[in-house]
């Protein structure tokens, strides 16, 4: 069965910055076709849950308190890359709008709530090694 790396929050793990999950009910259908490998790059990079929200600004990841957390985001992304290489994962489903996992949109970096076109750190690094990244809004495409 083909493996998919998936944002842990989408399978119900409470790992988001606010300590909540983003459970997606299509997960049950995905399990019929794929082996899911849940992963949260922010937690794996050393950040706790809950945590101060972070956004990408001028190439760095800065939290709302002004702390540079780029290292932790890169560390988690590198671990995701290593897992995909080791397990030969070619598909990822990542939570859009996240500074780690966003593959279509991210926040503007100024904590205004405004979304812009862009990619998170993990999504970018996975695409660089040839992993096809989908958002939670594209799960139905994988189920066809």
Image (cartoon, rainbow, N blue to C red):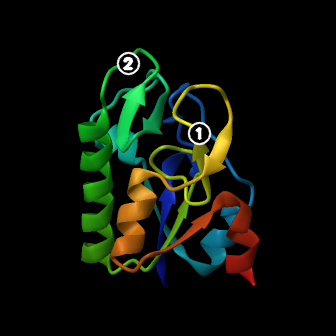
Q: Are marks 2 and 1 in contact (CB under 8 Å)?
A: no
Whole-percent x, y for residue 132 in the image: 50, 77
The quarter holding residue 42 reads top left
Whole-percent x, y for residue 55 in the image: 48, 34
- Residue 19 visible here: yes
| Residue named by callout 2 | 66
Which circle marks residue 10 in the picture? Answer: none
Which circle marks residue 107 in the picture? Answer: 1
Label 2, label 1: how far apart the Cα atoms are:
15 Å
SS type, badge 2: loop
Whole-percent x, y for residue 37 in the image: 44, 63
- Residue 97 visible here: no
Residue shown at 75% from the left, 84% from the top: 144
Closer-to-camera residue (106/110): 110
Label 2: few (<14), some (14–19) or many (≥20) C-alpha neighbours in 10 Å: few
Residue shown at 67% from the left, 78% from the top: 142
SS type, badge 1: strand
Closer-to-camera residue (5/75): 75
Left or right of 58? Residue 118 is right
Whole-percent x, y for residue 1 in the image: 49, 85
Task: Give above or below for 105 relative to 33.
Answer: above
Label 1: few (<14), some (14–19) or many (≥20) C-alpha neighbours in 10 Å: many
Left or right of 127? Residue 33 is right
Task: Give above or below for 35 relative to 73.
Answer: below
Number of marks present in the image shown: 2
Residue shown at 44% from the left, 37% from the top: 57
The quarter holding residue 112 reads top right
Which residue sits furthest front? Answer: 58
Residue shown at 68% from the left, 35% from the top: 114
Which residue sits furthest top? Answer: 65
Label whose residue precedes the other's in the sequence (2 or 1): 2
Left or right of 44? Residue 136 is right
């Amino acid at each position: 069965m083909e493996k998919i790396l998936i944002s842990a929050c989408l399978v119900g793990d409470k790992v988001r910055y606010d300590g909540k999950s983003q459970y997606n009910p299509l997960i049950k259908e995905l399990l019929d076709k794929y082996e899911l490998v849940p992963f949260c790059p922010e937690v794996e990079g050393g950040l706790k849950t809950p945590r101060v929200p972070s956004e990408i600004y001028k190439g760095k990841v800065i939290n709302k308190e002004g702390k540079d957390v780029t290292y932790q985001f890169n560390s988690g992304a590198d671990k995701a890359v290593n897992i995909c290489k080791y397990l030969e994962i070619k598909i990822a489903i990542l939570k859009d709008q996240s500074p780690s996992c966003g593959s279509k949109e991210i926040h503007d970096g100024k904590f205004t709530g405004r979304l812009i076109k862009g990619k998170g750190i993990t999504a970018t690094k996975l695409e660089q090694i040839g992993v096809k990244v989908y958002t939670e809004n594209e799960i139905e495409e994988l189920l066809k």
